[in-house]
Amino acid sequence: MKQIRKKHFSVKLFTSVMAFILLMNHTTSAQIDCSSASGILALMAAPVAINTVDPDDFPLNPSLIVSCTTKVFKTPPASISSICTNAIKMYVFYSTTQSDLSSLPNLASSQLAAVLKKPNFKATITSTSNQNEKKVSVTFPNNKFIAGQRVYYRYGKLIDHPTDMDPMTWSPILNFITPQHIVNLPSACINPDLKPAPENMNEIILFKIIGGSWADAAGHTYQQISGEWCKSFFNTSGVIIEPITGNDPSIGPMRQKTISLPPINWGVSETNNRPIQNSFTNQLTRSGENTILATFNISSMTANSTQMGPPFTNRGTRTVYLFEQQNKACAVRTFDAVHGNLNITENNYIVKVDSGNTITECTDSSNDNIKTYSHGGGNTVVFPSN
């Protein structure tokens, strides 16, 4: 890989290529030029990591292997050049402390060389039958961690290209428990195994603050949020369709609208090809809250099936603001003179299957039956880039 340099995206460059990415989302037959800045952003738009697998998914396997699938493009062209696939480098950053990984995206935007000095392994990328998908895997040394230790990790996708940009996009923070010992069973487990659904954390997008901040002349403060919540301000060509609702001498014209957060779709999957004849209960909660948001009962399940509960719709609304002169950034108000500090972030959602512990499973533990959905914004490049 060439020498890593500190990178800066210009507002002019970003604005000029967004229409290109939107066009690629609707025109799968067009060829994408990965030697251009717009091609780099098209590579960034693809999901970093899907179908993630880690050691605690296979409790009898002593190897510390993490793997996922990464996509080359969100919407692929008819053919994909080797220039595009060769530009993708994948890294797995790890720590025994979750907070160590939270600051990596911000650090990468200003000091990419410093990020690559953080503890990481370069992943192996192999081809699949789908030219738009690549298999990514890393094997941690068995002596890297102690038995039963929780290890946090996340994937970083580096678009390594001979231009003045080396952008990097990120997966959510994942974790696994290192195997405590090897168990040799006389035969395969015949019990069912339950896991929360959906499998992919990216399918539940939380409302969280991600970026910069502004203040207006009236003393209100705003903080940037993911572009995922900005899309309704624009049409499919990237043109702003919402009228101006105000103008401030310090931050220019702004637009505002109230959005309803989409429903949470949650459920349970049986993963060991075994039917379940007994009834059991599942719960949806949020971290830091004692209230059970939703419960649904299942009387039986067929082998390898998934049952989804009623969608959780009571997520409320948020007032979001678009600041055209701040690179079309989307934000929320976090302070005003009347109400003081405004807390608009959304706590992580937690799906707990078989909450009454009534089903005998192959892997019957809280780590296996509980999943925390903590991804805050999605990997899609929209207006503005997130």
Image (spheres, rainbow, N blue to C red):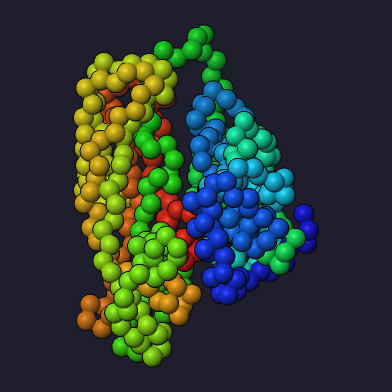
Residue 342 coordinates in the image, percent (x, y): 28, 71
Residue 34: quadrant of the picture: bottom right
Is residue 283 among what the camera can see? yes
Pinpoint residue 85: horizontal percent, then vertical percent.
68, 46
Residue 360 shown left or right of residue 24 in the figure: left
Q: Residue at x 65, y 44 (%)?
A: 80
Residue 249: percent from the left, percent from the top? 38, 91
Residue projecting furthest to the top: 186
In the figure, is residue 29 to the left or right of 231? right
Figure quadrant of residue 107: bottom right
Q: Please tell me whether residue 88 is drawn above or below residue 56 in the rendered image.
A: below
- Residue placed most toward the observer, 148 or 64: 64
The vertical placement of 54 against 248, above or below, is: above
For residue 352, side relative to residue 149 (left or right): left
Who is closer to the viewer here, 114 or 186? 114
Label total for image = 0
How far from the left and from the top, in percent, is residue 317?
24, 61
Please tell me which residue is depicted at 36% across the width and 54% down the height of the picture. Answer: 206
Does residue 257 sit above or below 299 in this rendering? below
* Residue at position x 50%, y 9% in the image: 187
Q: Quadrant of the N terminus?
A: bottom right
